[in-house]
């Protein structure tokens, strides 16, 4: 009966700190918004359809590599920084175990644990150096030593997600041209942007409609501004010619 009661009240938290998942979400959204803006902006100048396709492909490839390299560099730097902090804690635990034990006990006391219980708990944690390091990492640094993130995984995820997002508004230009292709490109990008909002709302617990509208408006503003710029540049070039 006790087992059933416990099971009924069990709940699981989603892993929201993984570098790959974060990179995938932002990579897809970034690829979608940046490339639909680029495509619509170039289309606003009314060039040949091949120019729009070339611009969209260039935006996809360049953006995906830029996103992946940036994500790799960021995650790598973060991992190296955290590893350095962990090594510093490891050395301190080896050289000054009593000081570190008192420091851990003080942390527990600051969080409301009774002094005697805090000392006992800190002493227990320091009986095993590995457990002591893990505990100090969690309590002082707020990290899990076994979950520092993978730069390669985050970069690959970011690359694929950006490329997928950037491909969506580009696809219509392989089957159509002119204003029709531009309208379809904007329409599919709008649906994808709203879809990103709905997916994010499921993770955050926020209103799906509000989150979808927010992402849709962001994409619309970016595409609208670049289309206006492209139209003005195209008109200016035509006047000069």
Image: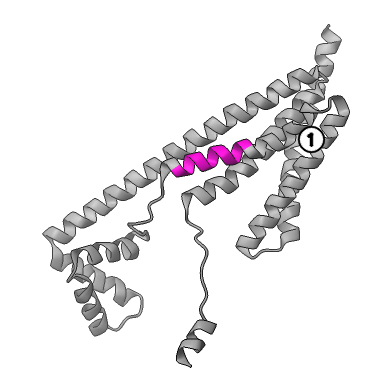
- Which residue appears farthest toward the right when viewing the image? 180
Asked if residue 123 lies left or right of residue 211, the reply is left
Per the rendered image, the range of residues in magenta is 153-163
Q: Position of residue 20 (x, y in %)?
A: 49, 48
228 in relation to 120, above or below: above
State the residue in front, 240 or 129: 129
160 magenta-colored: yes
Q: Position of residue 204 (x, y in %)?
A: 61, 62
- Which residue appears farthest toward the bottom when viewing the image? 1
State the residue in front, 72 or 238: 72
Hey, which quadrant is residue 170 in on the image? top right
For the stretch drawn in magenta, the main secondary structure is: helix
Hey, which quadrant is residue 174 in on the image? top right
Q: Residue at x 30, y 74 (%)?
A: 108
Q: Position of residue 44 (x, y in %)?
A: 81, 25
State the residue in front, 238 or 133: 133
54 in relation to 79, above or below: above
Asked if residue 196 lies left or right of residue 78, the reply is right
Q: According to the image, what is the colour scheme of the structure?
A: one colour
Q: Position of residue 114 (x, y in %)?
A: 29, 84
Q: Which residue is mark 1?
A: 185
């Amino acid at each position: 009966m006790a087992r059933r009661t416990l099971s009924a009240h069990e709940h699981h938290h989603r892993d929201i700190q993984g570098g790959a998942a974060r990179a995938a979400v932002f990579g897809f959204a970034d690829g979608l918004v940046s490339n639909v803006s680029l495509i619509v902006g170039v289309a606003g100048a009314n060039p040949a359809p091949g120019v729009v396709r070339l611009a969209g492909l260039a935006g996809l490839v360049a953006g995906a590599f830029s996103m992946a390299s940036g994500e790799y560099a960021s995650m790598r730097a973060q991992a190296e920084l955290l590893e350095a902090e962990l090594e510093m804690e490891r050395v301190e635990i080896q050289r000054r175990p009593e000081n570190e034990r008192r420091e851990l006990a003080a942390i527990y006391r600051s969080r409301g644990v009774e002094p005697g219980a805090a000392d006992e708990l800190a002493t227990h944690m320091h009986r095993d150096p590995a457990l002591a390091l893990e505990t100090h990492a969690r309590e002082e640094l707020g990290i899990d030593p076994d979950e520092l993130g993978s730069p390669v995984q985050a970069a690959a995820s970011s690359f694929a997600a950006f490329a997928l997002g950037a491909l969506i508004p580009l696809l219509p230009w392989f089957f159509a041209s002119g204003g029709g292709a531009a309208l379809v490109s904007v329409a599919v990008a709008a649906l994808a942007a709203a879809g990103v909002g709905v997916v994010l709302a499921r993770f955050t617990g926020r209103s799906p409609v509000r989150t979808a509208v927010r992402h849709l408006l962001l994409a619309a503003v970016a595409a609208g501004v670049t289309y206006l710029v492209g139209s003005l540049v195209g008109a200016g070039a035509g006047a000069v010619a």
